[in-house]
């Protein structure tokens, strides 16, 4: 897993004012589909889509890496972006507690990002 990829994704989410950005290190867990999840939320479907677009643009520009697959952009409630080792989850704020990925993967090491 590229630390540069993780950092670029987190910074891109912050640039678009994503809320409560966390990463889960799933690399030691059996059955995990990626080594890391990055999770954030936003107040509207427009902002969810803008964050997803911002992540895609930043990763392409800085790392010359394209997203493998994106799902959920059309409704903006929950966008999932597949970067191979890293899956990015951007929720509309009211949807995040419903799916509660942090609790589902509670055995993973959680890193919370704070920006000023």
Image: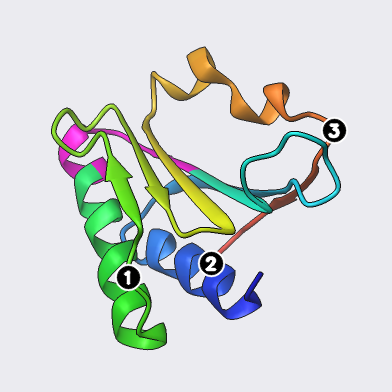
Of labels 3 and 1, earlier in sequence is 1
Rendering quarter of residue 104: top right
Of labels 3 and 2, earlier in sequence is 3
- Against 64, residue 96 (above or below) is above
In space, the residues marked 3 and 2 are separated at their CA atoms by 29 Å
Quadrant where the image shows the N terminus: bottom right
Residue 85 at x, y percent in the picture: 59, 59
Which residue in the structure is indicated by mark 2?
116
- Against 61, residue 86 (above or below) is above
| Secondary structure type for disc 3 | loop
Residue at the location (80% across, 40% down)?
Answer: 108
Residue at the location (17% across, 28% down)?
Answer: 75
**Furthest-top residue in this view:** 98
Rendering quarter of residue 93: top left
- Against 101, residue 10 (above or below) is below
Residue 108 located left or right of residue 57? right
């Amino acid at each position: 897993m590229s630390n540069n990829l993780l950092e670029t994704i987190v910074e891109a989410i912050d640039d678009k004012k994503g809320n409560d950005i966390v990463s889960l290190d799933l690399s030691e867990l059996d059955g995990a589909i990626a080594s890391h999840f990055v999770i954030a939320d936003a107040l509207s479907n427009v902002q969810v889509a803008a964050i997803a677009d911002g992540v895609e643009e930043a990763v392409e520009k800085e790392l010359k890496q394209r997203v493998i697959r994106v799902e959920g952009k059309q409704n903006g409630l929950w966008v999932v972006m597949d970067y191979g080792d890293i899956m990015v989850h951007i929720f509309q704020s009211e949807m995040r507690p419903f799916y509660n990925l942090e609790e589902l993967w509670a055995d993973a090491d959680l890193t919370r990002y704070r920006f000023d």
